[in-house]
Image: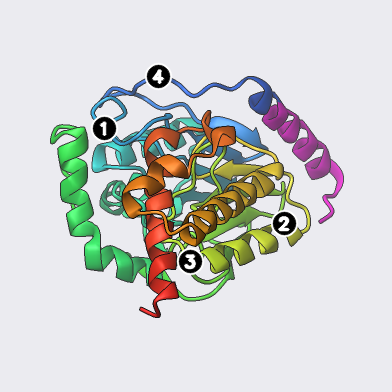
Amino acid sequence: MKLRGGLAHAAAAGLLGLALLLAGCAQGGAPRIDAELRAVPVAPGVYLLPGVPGEADRRTLGRIGNAGFIVGPHGVLAIDAGTSTLHGRALLRAIRRTTPLPVRAVLLTQTKPDFLFGALAFREAGIPVLMHREAAALMAARCRVCLERLRRDVGEAAMAGTELFVPDELFDQAHVLDRTGRPAQVLYFGHSSGPGDVAVLDPATGVLFAGGLLDERRIPDLHDADLPGWHGALAALRALPGVRGVVPGHGPPATPAVIDAVESYLSQLEDRVQVLLDEHAPLSEVADRAALPGYAGWDGYPGLHRRNAATLFLRREQEAFGR
């Protein structure tokens, strides 16, 4: 992917900013309900609205997922909506402090609550909410329960005004989305990290918003995943020309090496679980015996890795018995 003239120079400068973020950007501490967010530039016209490390609880207010936006000549494409209506409003304020251009749409990349439930803030501002059809179906089927659990975990005050919603526009395939005069590539590889999970590539700078497909130094969540599909999606991302930087679903901006890091975790987990299956280990021992010490420093390891191991063990056990 070639960049021309001034845009190439601007992209190089912006990607230098991304490199500086990689070297020294630390995500902030626990947010306040009324906190103002700061948009972090990662490339020319491309911004990160960072989440905070940790799990969804009263300390983090559930605001653990990244959001972002791409500024074109005629408007803004927002990517993901945050955890709650209050969080979504804070994201919108941060966008409006960065640019006077209108937000033309918000694209939801996945159904995890920390990317989803801020959508009403965009709807109340007259901004259409876009979502893959399979992700929208999963949300409709189960996210009322997700929302109740989130209210319990982070507190009613943090979730004030947050309700389940219906997306304004659904899509089924990968496509080019151009509402702003700056075309973005919406990438869809089938069921991977979750049904209807998508990524967004800004061809002008090579920045990839990876959604649920990639997290930086955070344990990936297998709950909704199809592992063969996820491996296939990672291979497709690796083969994409011109990807220079990654805004992951969780964690700070990353290089494309994050693709290999996520692939390595998934493969090592699969190998370890297969050993336990071959040894006829009881489910009660799986979480302890599936330890992967090389990932102990990743966010979410104490709880999420143990859940992943048990989830995968049960799936493989059921497959072995033909259920």
Q: Which residue is mark 3?
A: 226
- Secondary structure, mark 4, is loop
For disc 1, the marked residue is 57
Question: Percent x, y for residue 46?
Answer: 60, 41
Which label's residue is closer to the chain start, 2 or 4?
4
Which part of the image, by quadrant, shows the N terminus? Answer: bottom right
For the residue pair 176 and 56, the one nearer the viewer reads as: 56
Residue at x 58% of width, y 47% of height: 265
Residue 238 shows which numbered tag?
A: 2
User: Alpha carbon of mark 2 to alpha carbon of mark 4: how far?
Assistant: 32 Å
Mark 2 vs 1, N-terminal side: 1
Dot 4 corresponds to which residue? Answer: 29
Q: Is residue 100 magenta?
A: no
The stretch of residues the image draws in magenta is 1-19
Question: Label 1 neighbourhood size at 10 Å, few (<14), some (14-19), many (20+)?
Answer: some
- Residue type, label 1: Asp
Of labels 4 and 3, earlier in sequence is 4
Identity, as a three-letter code, of the amino acid under mark 4: Gly
Residue 321 placement (x, y as % from top left): 39, 76
Q: Nearer the viewer, residue 272 or 128?
A: 272
Q: Would you identify the image quadrant in which residue 246 lies? A: top right
Q: Nearer the viewer, mark 4 or mark 1?
A: 1
Q: Amino acid at mark 3?
A: Asp
Mark 3 or 2, closer to the camera: 3
